[in-house]
Image (spheres, rainbow, N blue to C red):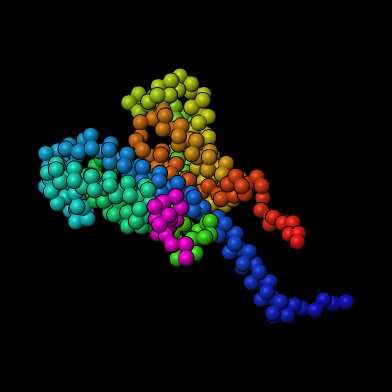
Amino acid sequence: MSQEPSSPSTMRKRLGGSTDRFGRAIRRRVAIDRRALAAFRISIAALLIADLVGRTRLLGMFYTDAGVLPREALFSDYSSLTAYSLHTLSGAAWAQWLLFLVAGLVALALLVGYRTRIATIVSWLLLVSLHVRNPMVLNAGDVLLRMLLFWSIFLPLGSRWSIDARRRNPAQSSGDAAPTIATIGTIAVLLQVLLMYLTNAVHKTRSDMWMSGEAVVHIFQADHLTVLLGNVLPEYTALLEVFTYAWMVLIVLSPLLLLLTGVPRALLVTGFAGMHLGVLVTLRIGLFPLIVVAGLLLFYPRRLGHREFTRGPRRPRRTAPAHA
């Protein structure tokens, strides 16, 4: 017997079902747990404060007219950028101290989640202004911090663990009930971190030193870069070669940060975070490792929460009937 062809309505249902499954699969990979957003907010705010404190040690040298880059030289070399900097309005030290203080207070508001959206926007504007004042002292960590903070403007960073969340009227916050969020903003911030690794992978796979396993060995032979454990590791060249290949494998597999879900993704994220924390205690590269780890927090899946991971769904409690 010949099988009758499917009707148009059946085809539409199958197509609609496939589209729904694909949409759910995409959402699972770009959704961010609101608790991870809160941890990210606290981390980024703390890093902003730490960055400001670190820069105050050389504030007069790098951000005043009495330093290495007076405003006249800045306007001459970077004229297209200076219009975006409040820090160029005055070359006096007191003005820079005032702006640093304001930036620190706004970062503190971001840390505790007070007027979170406004604090995020103002923090980003002041960070851009500070970076424009002296582009000569920036590094990759500064760029990543600036980009993560920019995408944070489009994320509900204050929906958990914040003063804003405690003050919010429950009747007005029913939209915050979902434990995860998937929006254009979450896609952008996750892709920002992934793009960093992909760019890193492209450059390193084109490097003979990295492909031969010698790169990390040479890095740790630079005494001015090493710190703490980094002063001991140069004696273990075989171990450093293993680290070279391990990092190459991780960055080549970095697209899996988005493709994986659940425990496999958490394990991969932890591997990346562990490598960056290892760099923190071996090399002098500032806050960069901690900035990356803050971005990696966003990849941790929700299902690693203790209650969900170990107990499964909660069943309704059965109550005994009341006796007369």
Q: Is residue 93 magenta?
A: no
**Image position of 49 (left or right of 38):** left
Residue at the spot x=15%, y=46% of the render? 95
Q: Nearer the viewer, residue 221 or 321?
A: 321
Percent from the top left, x then y, of residue 138?
28, 42
Q: Which secondary structure is most common in the magenta stretch?
A: loop
In which quadrant of the rendered view does residue 169 lie? Answer: bottom left
Percent from the top left, x then y, of residue 136?
24, 42
Q: Is residue 177 visible?
A: yes
Q: Which residues are magenta?
A: 154-171
Residue at the extreme bottom: 8
Above or below residue 59? Residue 152 is below
Q: Nearer the viewer, residue 121 or 146?
A: 121
Location of the C terminus by quadrant is: bottom right
Residue at the spot x=69%, y=79% of the render? 9
Q: Is residue 250 visible?
A: no
Percent from the top left, x then y, of residue 3?
82, 76
Above or below residue 225? Residue 198 is below
